[in-house]
Amino acid sequence: LSGVAGVELQEQRAQIIGYRMIENPEDPEGYNIIGEFRSNQFARSGTSSVFTEWVLNLPMDFSVTAGLGLSGMNIDLEDRLYNPNSTNERNVSANYNGLYSPHFAINKVFNNNISVYASYSKGYKAPVSGNIVLSTSGELNTGLVPEVGNQFEIGSKGNLFDNKLHYQLALFNAIFKDKFTSVAV
């Protein structure tokens, strides 16, 4: 039995300024240019993660891997162009905690040159400030939930022809829920 464990902490601070795009008066048929100032947001985001993964070697060259991660994220946004007559809030916070990510795998080694495996893993991606702040309008999209992905994978790795051919073959099915898709405007 062997394993690893770890902790990761990160923090980011950003000044997000948005401008309206306008028609270029010198070239109306060309690309638009930057126009008036639309938004000024200050964002602070932080992530934390605690994880562990263990491998148990079994008879007949089988091994089982099991891991678990626990992560969280928080975002604090301040509207530095706050207008008390608007419907926007001056300060917005979002916390995404208790995101559990399990990982399981089984592996079988054949003659030290070929192995086959099957695995399952789950992961999260919490919204970032770029998903929440709509820079073109200055509005906030505060109803977002983390993306969730579940992946099932089977595959084989190995060396053939006296180590002259190295291969890796994998088939997987990834299923996402609450996917973020950025659309350029």
Image (cartoon, rainbow, N blue to C red):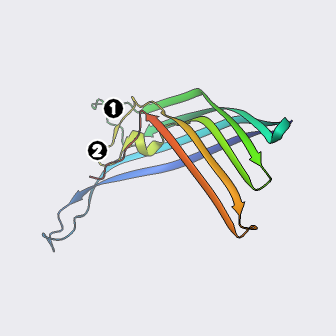
Tell me what residue is drawn at x 64 percent, y 50 percent. Answer: 156
Give the percent coordinates (x, y) of residue 181: 37, 44
State the SS at label 2.
loop
| Depth order, front residue of 112/77 | 112
Which of the two discs, 1 and 2, sits closer to the camera?
Answer: 2
Q: Is residue 2 visible?
A: no
Q: Residue at x 63, y 33 (%)?
A: 71
Residue 74: x, y in percent? 56, 34
Crowd tier of the residue under label 1, counting other residues whose Cα lies within 10 Å: few below 14, some 14–19, many 20 or above = some
Residue 117 image offset from top left, x and y in percent: 67, 42
Instruction: Give the quarter of the image for residue 96.
Output: top right
Helix, strand or loop under label 1:
loop
Q: Is residue 163 something one can see in this rendering?
A: yes
For residue 54, the mark is none
Q: Quadrant of residue 151?
A: top right
Seen at 49% across and 39% down, the residue is 174
Q: Residue 137 lies in what quarter of the image?
A: top left
Which amino acid does the dot numbered 1 rest on?
A: Asn
State yes or no: discs 1 and 2 in contact (Cβ < 8 Å). no
Q: According to the image, label 2 marks what residue?
A: 137
Question: In this view, which residue lies farthest toward the top?
Answer: 98
Cα gap from disc 1 to disc 2, whole angstroms: 11 Å
Instruction: Tell me: 15 left or right of 39.
Output: right
**Three-letter code, disc 2:** Ser
Q: Residue at x 28, y 32 (%)?
A: 86
On-image quarter of the N terminus:
top right
Circle 2 crowding by C-alpha within 10 Å: few under 14, some 14–19, many from 20 = few
Asked if residue 171 lies left or right of residue 2, the reply is left
Give the vertical position of 26 relative to 51 (above or below).
Answer: below
Q: Position of residue 165 (x, y in %)?
A: 67, 67
Per the image, the residue denoted by label 1 is: 88
